[in-house]
């Protein structure tokens, strides 16, 4: 079972490259979903148990911004950029300093480009960022 964490977008800063994400859709949670478990338990035939540490900290960050936000165009252009120029750092920071730590990844990229049609009911546009080695700060 992967580790999934939900954060209130009002209390945290998400920075994609040099761009601070704002224009969140109403009641948006920032979701960080790690690809795997951090630790696992191995049981031997003799009943002995050992804890195995996994160093896979790859994760997906999901968030929604308003359909009419100019960030959608900026993120689309970045997602379409090929090679290393299409990757960026990802910084996640607690605004309130309530003891909750942030996270950092030196390399992230957009997994897909969402539908950017603007409808009459202004729902949020969900973006997914794949982060390589997203470590808690």
Image (spheres, rainbow, N blue to C red):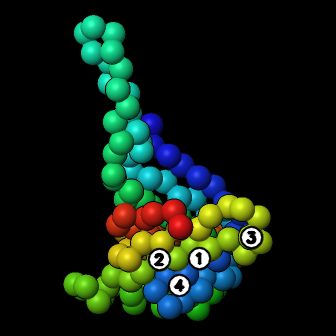
> Could you tell me how far apart the alpha carbons at marks 3 and 2 are, in whole angstroms?
19 Å
For residue 118, which numbered disc appears in the image? none
- Marks 3 and 4 sit apart, C-alpha to C-alpha, by 29 Å
For the residue labelled by badge 1, is the local secondary structure a helix, a strand or a loop? strand
Which quadrant of the figure has residue 126? bottom right
Find disc 3 in the rendering and name its residue.
Answer: 97
Secondary element type, mark 4: helix
**Mark 3 or mark 1, whichever is nearer to me:** 3
Query: Is residue 121 visible in this depiction of the protein?
Result: no
Dot 2, how many residues are within 10 Å of its Cα: few (below 14), some (14-19), or many (20+)? Answer: many
The tag earlier along the polypeptide, 2 or 1, is 1
| Residue at left offset 55%, top offset 81% | 15
Q: CA distance from mark 2 to mark 1?
A: 7 Å
CB-based contact (under 8 Å), mark 2 and mark 1: yes
* Image: 71 above or below 9: below
In the rendered image, which quarter contains the N terminus? top left
Question: Disc 3 or disc 4, which is closer to the eye?
Answer: 3
Q: Residues within 10 Å of mark 4 (few under 14, many from 20)?
A: many
Question: Spatial distance from mark 3 to mark 1, Cα to Cα?
Answer: 15 Å
Q: Earlier in the sequence, mark 3 or mark 2?
A: 2
Q: Nearer the viewer, mark 2 or mark 4?
A: 2
The residue that label 2 is drawn on is 90
Front: mark 1 or 4: 1
């Amino acid at each position: 079972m992967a580790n999934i964490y939900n954060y209130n977008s009002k209390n945290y800063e998400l920075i994609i490259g040099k761009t601070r994400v704002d224009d969140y859709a109403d009641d948006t949670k920032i979701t960080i979903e790690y690809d795997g478990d951090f630790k696992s338990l191995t049981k031997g035939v003799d009943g002995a148990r050992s804890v195995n540490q996994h160093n896979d900290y790859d994760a997906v960050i999901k968030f929604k911004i308003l359909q009419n936000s100019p960030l959608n165009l900026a993120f689309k252009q970045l997602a379409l950029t090929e090679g290393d120029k299409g990757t960026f750092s990802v910084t996640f920071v607690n605004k309130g300093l309530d003891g909750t730590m942030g996270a950092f990844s030196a390399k992230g990229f957009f997994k897909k480009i969402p539908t950017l049609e603007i409808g009459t009911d202004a729902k949020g546009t969900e973006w997914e960022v794949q982060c390589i080695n997203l470590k808690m700060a």
